């Protein structure tokens, strides 16, 4: 986080050193009259506010020159560093002079006015004569950028809220005690309502991850991996911050800035949730289920609440899954179309929309025999995400998207295009886990030739069950990967090279599954039972996701794939 703030400050400082070249481009289209008008308005701003900007800039500089000794001090320092970049931008712009600097775009002057109104003036109002360095004020939550068609989104799940990043948060005067509170009590109520939802959904997981990390770090140095320790010590700082924020209450703590809330949500998305999912996946794939287990998982649940959850999820999937999948592809294409052509803040909003669509799509693809049921509250969050965020934004952004003729489709065949998109989106962390497992040779394992008749029968019974369930899907994935490898065997860029590397690793895994499915009791001796666990992991983590995506996109295109997916 510190590095990100440093980069942002450097970006604003670079605006000064490279101002002439950058601004000459912006002024190239201005007429002589508009240039005169620019410097007229610039001079008015400079005369009215440059002194106040320099005062706030100096105050922040003095504050940052002191080392913070406690956690509260570190938080204040982090917040001051965040607002320092806006103040520095105002200082750079207002110190420019006609004749020495080229006129900037009008948008820069509008940003200076906004920052003065929302940051500089509130600070100056708080600095009384003789007062020392002021405590960092707290911003009110920024307004939502796009209307929700009569409904307001309350983000209580695991995705970041989409805000108007071009609007700087308003700063409100502090109370006599020195703590900064929002003038609007509705903002405080909304903050604590969002806080309560986030705490209810993720606080227990945060505590569990914190305890797990601390338990690992408590081990002797010689009993742990040094690189792993360093990484966990780094991540533990973010986990501790999440626990600290989520443990606060309205009676004991003031409302935090939006940046803190966003940091908690981001830490949950990037650390807490992936860790919990990894633990769940490891527990799920430790042992291959028996035929009885497979039959029991396929049977309807006896718990009425669980049955109601899966029924509601099925209805949600039937109503919205195709829409979410199409919106997800559109958001990704939108980023490709406008990357470098639109402000990075706007592109980042679309990245958040991709996260929402991915999360909702993942939930709707879960099945009773592969995933435990979620809470009805979380399912309601998914519904709210779809109806108040994904669909409204999708409808609005489609008007800005280029026509199909304007885009270049690199893969003409629909089957190859689906394989290509699957390779792009495939989780590299998941692939690294798979590639770390050493494939057993396809050569017959003679060490199993002496097993008992009962063990051999158990092996072939399990293999037959897996073959009955997944043989068609393995064939579909194998055919799709082989066709893609034959069509695109030569990489033209580093990105394509990485994509092909992922393809060949997955192709090797799927070929191993197909080889085992081709073996019979009459032609081959039984293999090691660990091989059954291995191909089951390959199917769950590669074959099934690929086939689900292929089937979904085939339905969306209104066509039929040559391979049947069961």
Image (spheres, rainbow, N blue to C red):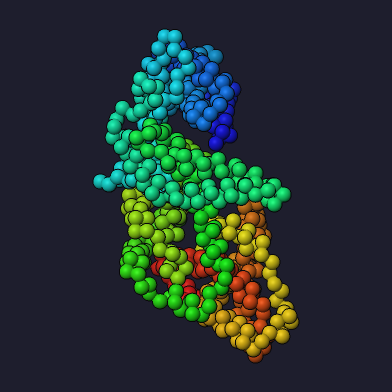
Residue 302: percent from the left, percent from the top? 36, 73
The answer, for residue 46, to whether it is visible in the render is no
Q: Is residue 74 above or below residue 51?
A: below
Taking the spot 48% from the left edge, 65% from the top edge, the residue there is 549
Which part of the image, by quadrant, shows the N terminus? top right
The answer, for residue 368, to whether it is visible in the render is yes
Instruction: Find residue 310 and report its image quarter.
Output: bottom left
Residue ranking furthest to the bottom = 522
Q: Considering depth in this image, is 27 or 389 the residue closer to the camera?
A: 389
Residue 412: percent from the left, percent from the top? 53, 62
Taking the spot 65% from the left edge, 59% from the top edge, the residue there is 501
Q: Considering depth in this image, is 292 or 153 the residue closer to the camera?
A: 292
Q: Considering depth in this image, is 264 or 31 the residue closer to the camera?
A: 264
Q: Is residue 71 above or below residue 162?
A: above
Q: Is residue 269 above or below residue 16?
A: below
Residue 89: percent from the left, percent from the top? 49, 23
Taking the spot 52% from the left edge, 24% from the top edge, the residue there is 23
Residue ranking furthest to the left = 150
Q: Is residue 77 above or below residue 458?
A: above
Instruction: Find residue 541 and report its image quarter.
Output: bottom right
């Amino acid at each position: 986080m510190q590095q990100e703030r440093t980069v942002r400050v450097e970006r604003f400082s670079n605006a000064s050193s490279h101002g002439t070249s950058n601004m000459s481009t912006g002024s190239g289209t201005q007429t002589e009259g508009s240039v005169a008008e620019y410097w007229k308005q610039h001079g008015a701003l400079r005369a009215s506010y440059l002194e106040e900007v320099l005062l706030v800039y100096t105050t922040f500089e003095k504050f940052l020159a002191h080392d913070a000794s406690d956690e509260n001090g570190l938080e204040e320092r982090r917040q001051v560093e965040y607002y320092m970049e806006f103040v520095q931008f105002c200082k750079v712009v207002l110190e420019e002079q006609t004749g020495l600097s080229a006129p900037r775009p009008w948008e820069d002057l509008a940003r200076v006015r906004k920052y003065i109104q929302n940051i500089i003036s509130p600070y100056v109002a708080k600095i009384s004569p003789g007062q020392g360095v002021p405590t960092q004020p707290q911003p009110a939550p920024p307004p939502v950028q796009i209307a929700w068609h009569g409904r307001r989104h309350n983000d209580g799940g695991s995705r970041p809220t989409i805000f108007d990043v071009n609007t700087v948060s308003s700063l409100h005067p502090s109370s006599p005690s020195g703590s900064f509170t929002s003038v609007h009590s509705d903002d405080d109520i909304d903050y604590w309502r969002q806080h309560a939802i986030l705490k209810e959904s993720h606080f227990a997981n945060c505590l569990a991850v914190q305890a797990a990390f601390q338990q690992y770090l408590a081990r002797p140095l010689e009993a742990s991996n040094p690189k792993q320790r360093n990484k966990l010590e780094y991540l533990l700082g973010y986990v501790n911050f999440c626990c600290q924020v989520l443990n606060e209450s309205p009676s004991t703590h003031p409302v935090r800035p939006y940046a803190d809330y966003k940091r908690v949500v981001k830490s949950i998305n990037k650390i807490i949730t992936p860790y919990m999912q990894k633990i769940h996946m490891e527990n799920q794939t430790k042992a291959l289920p028996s035929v009885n287990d497979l039959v029991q998982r396929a049977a309807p649940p006896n718990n009425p609440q669980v049955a109601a959850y899966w029924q509601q999820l099925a209805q949600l999937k039937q109503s919205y899954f195709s829409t979410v999948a199409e919106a997800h592809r559109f958001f990704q294409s939108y980023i490709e179309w406008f990357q470098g052509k639109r402000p990075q803040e706007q592109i980042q909003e679309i990245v958040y929309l991709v996260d929402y669509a991915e999360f909702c799509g993942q939930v709707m693809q879960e099945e009773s025999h592969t995933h435990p049921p979620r809470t009805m509250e979380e399912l309601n969050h998914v519904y709210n995400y779809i109806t108040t965020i994904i669909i409204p934004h999708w409808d609005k952004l489609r008007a800005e998207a280029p026509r199909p003729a304007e885009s270049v489709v690199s893969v003409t065949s629909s089957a190859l295009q689906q394989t290509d998109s699957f390779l792009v989106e495939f989780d590299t962390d998941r692939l690294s886990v798979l590639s770390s497992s050493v494939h057993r040779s396809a050569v017959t394992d003679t060490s199993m030739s002496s097993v008992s008749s009962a063990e051999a029968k158990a092996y072939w019974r399990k293999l037959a069950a897996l073959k009955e369930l997944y043989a068609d899907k393995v064939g579909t994935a194998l055919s799709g990967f082989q066709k893609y490898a034959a069509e695109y065997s030569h990489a033209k860029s580093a990105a394509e090279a990485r994509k092909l590397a992922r393809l060949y690793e997955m192709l090797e895994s799927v070929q191993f599954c197909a080889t085992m499915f081709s073996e019979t009791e009459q032609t081959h001796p039984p293999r090691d039972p660990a091989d059954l666990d291995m191909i089951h992991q390959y199917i769950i983590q590669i074959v099934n996701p690929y086939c689900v995506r292929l089937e979904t996109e085939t339905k969306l295109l209104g066509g039929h794939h040559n391979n049947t997916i069961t």
